[in-house]
Image (cartoon, rainbow, N blue to C red):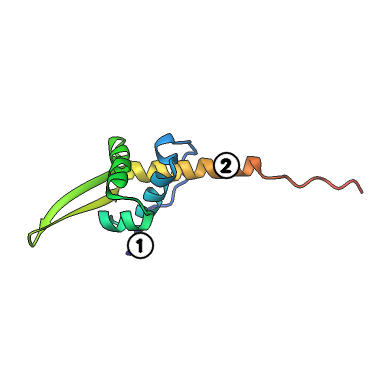
Amino acid sequence: MRQVAYPVTMPRPIFDPVVHEPHRLQICALLAPTHGLPFARVRDEVGLSDSALSKHLRSLEAESYVRITRVVTAGRRSTRVTLTPAGREALCGHVSELQRLARLASPRPRASAD
């Protein structure tokens, strides 16, 4: 899997209910460091059936978070799934918000009563 270099900027922490669904979060995280992956690879990595993955991809595509490209090469059809810049921003913002919430929920050290 080829890594993709992106400018480092702090995402705005924002809870995204579309990305939050566990399988969609996995899909976005899997696609983030790539230039896109074949449908079959995403299906196998996430552990979903074709129909279940298609349903999640439709939800992500409706928000313009993924781009689905269908091509025919040497008589074989293939489908490639790519995270869009909007999808990357949504994923990073969502993860940032989850980190913010985790910091709020973590126990804070108490001052000792010495």
Q: Amino acid at mark 2?
A: Arg
User: Badges 2 and 1: C-beta atoms under 8 Å apart?
Assistant: no
Q: In the image, is 78 to the left or to the right of 32?
A: left
Which residue is tagged 1? 3
Mark 2 / mark 1, whichever is N-terminal: 1
Query: Residue placed farthest to the left in the image?
Result: 75
| Secondary element at tag 2 | helix
1 vs 73, nearest the viewer: 73
| Secondary element at tag 1 | loop
Question: Residue 75 at what x, y percent from top left?
Answer: 7, 59
Question: Residue 76 at what x, y percent from top left?
Answer: 11, 59
Local crowd at mark 1 within 10 Å, few (<14), some, or many (≥20)? few
Quarter where residue 35 is shown: bottom left
Local crowd at mark 2 within 10 Å, few (<14), some, or many (≥20)? few
Using the image, determine if residue 41 lies above or below residue 28.
below
Residue shown at the point (38%, 44%) measured from the top left: 24
Which residue is tagged 2? 100
Residue 38 seen in this snapshot: no
Question: Residue 6 at what x, y percent from top left?
Answer: 37, 54
Residue 16 seen in this snapshot: yes
Query: Residue placed farthest to the right in the image?
Result: 114
13 vs 58, nearest the viewer: 58
Q: Amino acid at mark 1?
A: Gln
Residue shown at the point (52%, 40%) measured from the top left: 97
